[in-house]
């Protein structure tokens, strides 16, 4: 079992930055693909970014390319999402996930709220 805890969310003005962290416990995340998802009120959950465990390949949704950066620090069992140039449409609850690949996640965190004011 892997437990995931997100942190770093909050209220920020448009154009600002936040860094989300996802701390894992229970097992090492070294061999897991890790992903960030978000869900805005009234909308479906969407994939934001992912990072593989082989070679650290990354994926970004078109809506965040060039603004968000995912990274992982296996020694700390932690994954990060650096979010720059935030927009009001980035407002959502952000979730961290771990799984065998970026298409299959088995473990989820509880989420952290990100609110971007205009």
Image: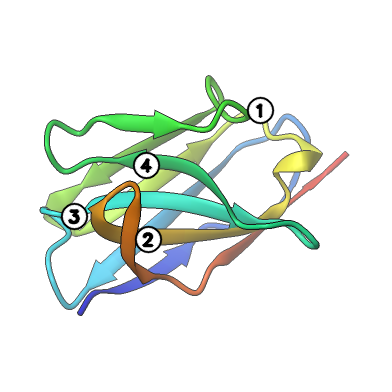
Q: Going 53% across and 68% down the picture, which residue do you hit? A: 111
Q: Which element is circle 2 on?
A: strand
Q: Mark 1 or 4, which is nearer the eye?
A: 4
Q: Residues within 10 Å of mark 3 (few under 14, many from 20)?
A: many
* Callouts 1 and 3 close, C-beta under 8 Å: no
Name the mark on residue 97.
Answer: 2
Q: Mark 1 or 3, which is nearer the eye?
A: 3
Q: Residues within 10 Å of mark 4 (few under 14, many from 20)?
A: many
Q: Which residue is mark 4?
A: 50
Q: Quadrant of the C terminus?
A: top right
* Callouts 1 and 4 close, C-beta under 8 Å: no
Q: Is residue 66 above or below residue 26?
A: above
Instruction: Answer whether residue 51 is visible to the viewer in this image.
Output: yes
Q: Which residue is mark 1?
A: 85
Instruction: Answer whether residue 10 is visible to the viewer in this image.
Output: no
Q: Mark 1 or 2, which is nearer the eye?
A: 2
Q: Earlier in the sequence, mark 2 or mark 4?
A: 4
Q: Which residue in the rendered view is the most extreme toward the front?
A: 103
Q: Which residue is mark 3?
A: 32
């Amino acid at each position: 079992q892997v437990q995931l805890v997100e942190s770093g969310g909050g209220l920020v003005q448009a154009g600002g930055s936040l860094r989300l962290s996802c701390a894992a416990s229970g097992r090492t995340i070294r061999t897991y693909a890790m992903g960030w998802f978000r869900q805005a009120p009234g909308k479906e959950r969407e994939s934001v970014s992912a990072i593989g465990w082989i070679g650290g390949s990354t994926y970004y949704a078109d809506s965040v390319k060039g603004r968000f950066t995912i990274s992982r620090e296996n020694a700390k069992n932690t994954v990060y999402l650096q979010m720059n140039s935030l927009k009001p449409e980035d407002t959502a609850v952000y979730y961290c996930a771990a799984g065998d690949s970026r298409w299959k996640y088995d473990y989820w965190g509880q989420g952290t709220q990100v609110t971007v004011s205009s």
